[in-house]
Amino acid sequence: MKITVTKDYEVIAKLNEPVQNLHADLYPDRFKRFAYEPVRDFVMGMMHDPNSVFLLLEDEGPLGYAWIEFRTYQESLFRKAYQSVYVHQISVSVQHKGYGSALMNHIYEMARSRGIGRVELDYWCDNSVAKEFYRKQGFVKYRELVYKEV
């Protein structure tokens, strides 16, 4: 197993298909089905952002990826300044083999190596697989986002 920083936007775009379609299945009124070209172009653009990093997980071929962002929150009247690694997306095509945990451990190490003590992410409430995975990883809720249709 190998985890590397990648600029291969085409591979990342292809690996996005399962996570995009999962969101579309769970929330069809909110998410579009996967379409390669627009995702490829989006990922290519995000790779120019100096705070965004794409990690590629390989084991005899590409198996997954993570899109992370190094964030700096400035001090304000209401909040103290802090830094975090924000996980925008993570997707692994093979479940229950430790690949997702390996990818997360790599992210934790990247955070520690930069002196960052917090990794943040969000997931959709109906995504029970993600919810259980992040619970096992030790993530705790500290904020909830709610909505009301009017």
Image (tube, grey):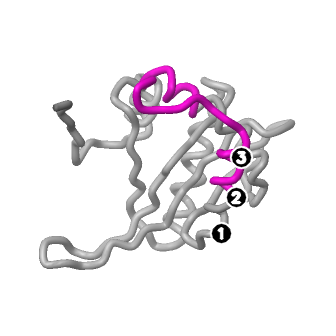
Between the residue at mark 3 and the residue at mark 1, the CA separation in whole angstroms equals: 14 Å
> Which quarter of the rendered picture does the C terminus lie within?
top left
Q: Is residue 70 left or right of residue 21?
A: left
The residue singled out by tag 3 in the image is 12
**Residue 134 picture location, percent across and down:** 42, 36
Q: Quadrant of residue 73?
A: bottom left
The residue singled out by tag 2 in the image is 44
User: Mark 2–mark 3 contact, CB under 8 Å?
Assistant: no
Identified at 55% across, 46% down, the residue is 104
- Could you say whether the residue bearing mark 1 is in a helix, strand or loop? loop
- Could you say whether the residue bearing mark 2 is in a helix, strand or loop? helix
Q: Amino acid at mark 3?
A: Ile
**Quick one: label 2, few (<14), some, or many (20+) residues within 10 Å?**
some
User: Mark 3–mark 1 contact, CB under 8 Å?
Assistant: no
Residues 117 and 88: in front is 88
Q: Amino acid at mark 1?
A: His
**Quick one: label 3, few (<14), some, or many (20+) residues within 10 Å?**
many
- Check residue 48 in the rendering and tell me which mark sits there, or answer none: 1
